[in-house]
Image (cartoon, helix red, strand yellow):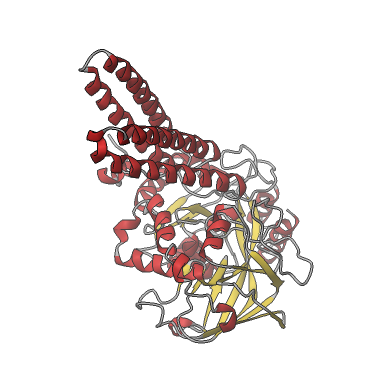
Amino acid sequence: AASPARAAVSPRMGLLPKTLAEFWGAHAAAWAATTAFFAVSVSVGGGAGWVLSALLSALSATSLSLAVLLGRNREEAGVALSLTASAYFTGTSALLHAAAATVATAAAGTAWLGLMRRLRTWHALLAAGSLGFAIKAANKDRAFGGAAGTRGLPLPTLALINSAAGAKMGEALAASLREEAARRADGGEAPLEVVNLEDVPPREALRSFGERHPQYRVLVCGGDGSVAWVLGEVEQLDAPYRPAVAILPLGTGNDMSRVLGWGKYFRPQSLRARLAALSLSRVALLDRWGVAGSLPDGREQLVMSNYLSIGVDARASLNWARLKAAAPALFSLRLLAKLWYIVLGTPELLLRSHRDLPSRLTLTCDGQRIPLPRRCQGLMVCNTPSYGGGSDLWDPTQGAPLPSRDRMQTEAVPPAADDGVLEIVCVTGVFHLAQTLAGFSNAVRLAQGREVSIEVEGSGVPLQVDGEPFGVASSGVSSLGPFSLTLRRLGTSLMLRAPAGGIDAADGEAGPSAVEGAMADGLISHEVREELLEKMARAS
């Protein structure tokens, strides 16, 4: 019988491709069926038809083999898979070009000529896109890791699930986690409690679990927005013990998960290994930044963990969020969620709605006015080195083929999520933004600082913080009025970083487990625990 986790996924969802590899595999399967049909058709004529039939049969078998390999692969878009797909689509495009040339010479073939040319163009685009994914995977689509140690101490775990995040895998994940919780209860292991954030708010879940377990950890199952939400509630806890927070990525970009080494997406087959890795993880610190001022939607303050953006990128995020609110079924798959961002951002190639941003935006960093480049159409302020799904906009050593000019007036320091310093960059348009996100280029570096102020004049300039844009409930961008804001560091959150060897590692860091064990034995206080963990995080 199917497990509850699998039963929660509808049959329709199970038939659709969930990753690029499955999409490529489905495409190869379609060509296998098509060439097999033509192989049978041309064999009827005998003679030369048998030779063509044999060639088509070989092509059909090759396509079918590739379809099986791609469809069964668990990776989303690795370098090898992307290069394989690019080579396959390039070869198919060449075959279609030759076929179109042959049909063009036949008087009876004009009806097919237009179709073949369209198919040739489509496959050429697929080849170029697959090559772009290969470059992105090689250069920027990575997790950020650390060093190893020894086996750790198991602690009670509170799993908070946002079932609406990303591709909406939350329901299936919750069923699997509850099975694991029952297994642990039967075996007398450290407790695991599963809470759906749509049913119970995080503050109530944290308070209830903390009353029953003096020491524990939190596992947030969701995207960056879910992580930020839970971190805010942890900071508001009226209790001496502050739990460390780990991440199971269910969102679209999952930048915080990448930074902490938990990966860019979640596969159900990895659940048991991920839970085991929690006891082997290291501690890490995350700066939390207060965003205060006259913000859109009547807001006056909020907290930022990852980044904020103004202009062209925020506009694409706003259109994406509005479409998702209006038609959530269009975002049921991770692949489609990423595709819609590209589709909704493409019109800016012609519109260039924010070409006047330098004249409307005033940027101040640590009391110094920072001029914007004349062609700037988007501004980003980053706390972490991962932006927009794994892209490092700041790092000058990333080796991008088309590096941007550096506008820094002082010597740059390596970015970190716990150094109390923000990185400020800009892009010159949607094409430059696409280049940076794909790994072909990097953003223009403007400044680094501990206090950043931004003032925008006039209406129609979008703003997003941690992937959550303002103005989703309104229509158009003209409803977005002028705004001003200042970013100042509020403090740090205690996070868990994945073991250096990945989620399948057999060993982890010894220090955090020793600290938790000492507190459990009454040897140190809550205050000493936090001080020791913070020192370990900064030393790693």
Q: Does residue 249 appear to the left or right of 197 in the view shown?
A: right
Residue visible at 68% across and 70% down? 446
Counting every numbered tag in the picture gives 0
Nearer-the-camera pick, 25 or 521: 25
As drawn, the residue found furthest toward the left would be: 44
Q: Residue 343 at x, y = what percent?
A: 40, 59
Q: Does residue 425 appear to the left or right of 190 in the view shown?
A: right
Q: Residue 436 at x, y = what percent?
A: 58, 58
- Where 83 sits versus 299, above or below? above
As drawn, the residue found furthest toward the right would be: 411
Residue visible at 72% across and 83% down? 367
Nearer-the-camera pick, 182 or 195: 195
Nearer-the-camera pick, 86 or 336: 86
Residue 207 visible, this angle: no
Q: Does residue 124 appear to the left or right of 279 in the view shown?
A: left
Residue visible at 59% across and 77% down? 290
Q: Residue 210 at x, y = what percent?
A: 51, 62
As drawn, the residue found furthest toward the top would be: 47
The N terminus appears in which quarter of the rendering?
A: top left
Residue 101 visible, this angle: yes
- Where 333 sits versus 344, above or below? above
Q: Residue 326 at x, y = what percent?
A: 30, 67
